[in-house]
Amino acid sequence: MTAQLIDGKLIAQQVRDDVAAEVAKRTAAGKPQPVLATVLVGERVDSATYVAAKGKACQDLGMGSVNHHLPANINQEDLEKVISDLNADKSISGILVQLPLPSHLNEERVLQLISIEKDVDGFSPINIGRLAQKGREPLFVPCTPYGCIYLLEQAGVKIEGANAVVLGRSNIVGMPAALLLIGKNATVTVCHSKTKDLPGVIRQADILIAAIGRTEMVRGDWIKPGAAIIDVGINSKPDASKKSGYRLVGDVNFDEAKEVAGFITPVPGGVGPMTIAMLMKNTLRAAQIQQGEI
Ligand code: GUN
């Protein structure tokens, strides 16, 4: 192994410890506890697991949380009423609508309804629009891309001037990650399923953020020697040696890539823990914004 491992679990824990210390300081000073409201629509097991983990993190860090679990067949109007009530509720610091929503609901209208001061996911069109524009700052940066950049910075990877390739262009990860890298003066290429000569493009990358959701798609010989690899993928791969019958792997073939890269995140234990850590940071920030502290 030549690559330096970027330990997301450790770095996420440091972020969480810092947030917990700041929350304790605020509480001791008599300020209101930051509270995250999650909205979960329907019965998707993965979404329910993520929402439960977010609530648990709030509890661990001394923050409050409330979950609104709504039926899968809720109509647009009733869902929008829940969001409006949370916007108006002064005890709520941040609002997170777990995605994806059932297909009969209009996700864009729901996200644009969230007050930007409470938009801890950073998905409202105003926050994303500001992220996309030079000289403007969003109030919140989307949690997973924020975590990716934080890992690069903690590892000491130079972003300015680097050739960065983002594999995947989702609203949740790829596109905001590309915008963040542009904002930090990287030269950014966004790749997707229609990209020609993907291995050739990735071979130019000093920094690769892989968020395409394809099991071990990126091979070792696609990687520029010394590159920094941030693997956002969480894919299950059949593995008879495991009790569950599978194991989690990323979008990058780790065993091959670690012999070529300069830095690499493992799966699990890389980007995964960062998403919730950054959400906790954003929820604290929301409370600070609402108290007029920042
Ligand atoms: N679904 C998958 N990732 C996310 C996320 O970061 N936030 C929300 N709200 N939904 C998601």
Image (tube, helix red, strand yellow):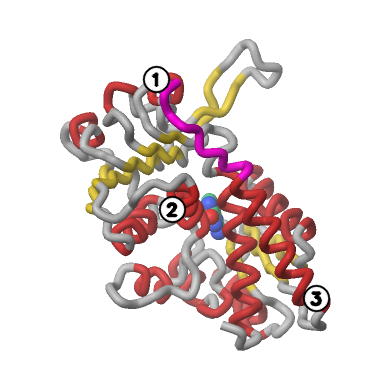
Residue type indicated by callout 2: Ile
Say which residue label 1 marks: 256
Question: In this rendering, is residue 48 above or below 244?
Answer: below
Q: Which residues are magenta?
A: 1-10
Q: Which numbered disc covers residue 57?
A: none
Q: CA distance from mark 2 to mark 1?
A: 23 Å
Q: Residue at x 50, y 33 (%)?
A: 5
Say which residue label 3 marks: 27
Residue type indicated by callout 1: Glu
Question: In this rendering, is residue 160 above or below 206?
Answer: below
Q: Position of residue 1 (x, y in %)?
A: 45, 20
Q: Position of residue 60 (x, y in %)?
A: 78, 56
Q: Earlier in the sequence, mark 2 or mark 1?
A: 2
Q: Earlier in the sequence, mark 3 or mark 2?
A: 3
Residue type indicated by callout 3: Thr
Which image quarter: residue 76?
Answer: bottom right
Question: In this rendering, is residue 249 above or below 209?
Answer: above
Q: Secondary structure at mark 3?
A: helix
Label 2 with label 1: CB-CB less than 8 Å: no
Q: Residue at x 28, y 46 (%)?
A: 164
Q: CA distance from mark 3 to mark 2?
A: 30 Å
Q: Position of residue 255 (x, y in %)?
A: 45, 20
Residue 192, can we see it?
A: yes
Say which residue label 2 marks: 149
Classify the position of the C terminus by image quarter. Answer: bottom right
Q: Residue furthest bottom?
A: 292
Residue neighbourhood size for the residue with mark 1, other residues' Cα within 10 Å, grouped as few (<14), some (14–19), many (≥20): some
Q: Nearer the viewer, residue 225 or 66?
A: 225
Total labels: the figure holds: 3
Q: Earlier in the sequence, mark 1 or mark 3?
A: 3
